[in-house]
Amino acid sequence: MSRIIGVSTAERIATGLVEDHKLVGKLRLRDEDQADEPLFSTPPAGIAECLADEVAAVSQGTKIDAVGIGMPGIIRDCIIEDSPNLRQLKGVNMKELMELALRARGIPAPAFIHNDADVLAAGLAATHGQLDRMIRVWTLGHGIGFGIYPPRPGIWEGGHVVVSLDPRERYCGCGGVGHLEGIMGHRAMRLRFLDMEPDEVFENAQKRDQRCVEFVKLWHRALAAATANSIHLAGPGKFYISGFNARHLELNLLNQYVHEMVKMSPLQSYVFEAVPSSDEDAVIGAAVSAAQSLATA
Ligand SMILES: [Zn+2]
């Protein structure tokens, strides 16, 4: 049985030992508020050092077969091709940096880097007994992530699909016009409503503030549009919705909008499930993804 350490960097750094798709022992959490330096202002080698410290703390000198890490951005063959929310990582060979940092701590295991939303999809598939079928996940956080399991060749930057033709929709972190993240992303919502926090926007919509009511409709329509596009390209199926802003989701409204957008009968069997943000699912997914990379390496 392989012993793999999974690391999630989604909302905070979480690290755990995974055997046979299950977490062994406790999850180790790094508190971002108490860390010396937040991740977004740390250079790539520093990020690798920090993650390797977490891995070393969990492995405690025992033998490890691989390390799997979920990170934001377009990641192919463990190289971060772009990462709008961690810009310093653009073009970085994170596998190389990570393995260097691990060796310095006496850990000779190979490291595998995957997109954080794909890692969460793998984790949800593993913990929900769905490793035999296709699942997709939207992560509603600072940015918008889109993960797909099993992994398939391609880019799959679902958070940046175009859901609006309005040229004024330009709040996306990547700079693109009309993107899903430009409407739903936490950072984008703060840019749009300079006078209130995203949580207040949703609260004020409940109190019938018209500007907020309209925005909450747009927010749901945007996710419906992106999902409908995915259904028309890859077929129906299960869509999980996670991330800290998933708490604002009204599934009835989302279903109503998708129903208006998807009319062909073979495409009707889609299902949404909101899942609480779980470091554990992400850590397990990072390990599952690493195990699959290890098997095909
Ligand atoms: Zn974008």
Image (cartoon, helix red, strand yellow):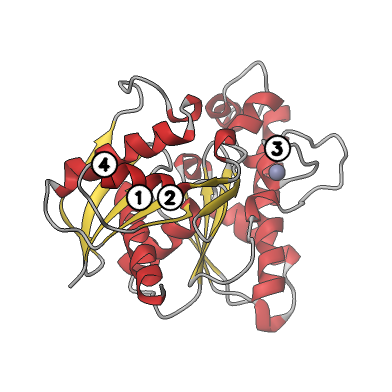
Residue 130: image quadrant is bottom left
**At which x and y percent is residue 35?**
32, 23
Disc 3 versus disc 1: nearer the observer:
1
Mark with earlier residue (2, 3): 2
**At which x and y percent is residue 247?**
46, 42
Asked if disc 4 and disc 3 are in contact, CB closer than 8 Å, the reply is no
* Residue occupying image coordinates x 33% and y 68%: 291
Asked if disc 2 and disc 1 are in contact, CB closer than 8 Å, the reply is yes
Cβ at disc 1 under 8 Å from ligand 1 = no
**At which x and y percent is residue 258?**
67, 62
Closer to the camera in the image, 163 or 94 = 94
Dot 3 amino acid type: Cys
The residue pinned by badge 3 equals: 172
The residue pinned by badge 2 equals: 96
**At which x and y percent is residue 128?**
34, 68
Tell me, for residue 99, which label it has, or none.
1
Cβ at disc 3 under 8 Å from ligand 1 = yes
Mark with earlier residue (1, 4): 1
How far apart in space, not on screen, are marks 4 and 3 (Cα)? 38 Å
Q: Residues within 10 Å of mark 4 (few under 14, many from 20)?
A: few
How far apart in space, not on screen, are marks 1 and 4 (Cα)? 9 Å
Q: Secondary structure at mark 2?
A: helix
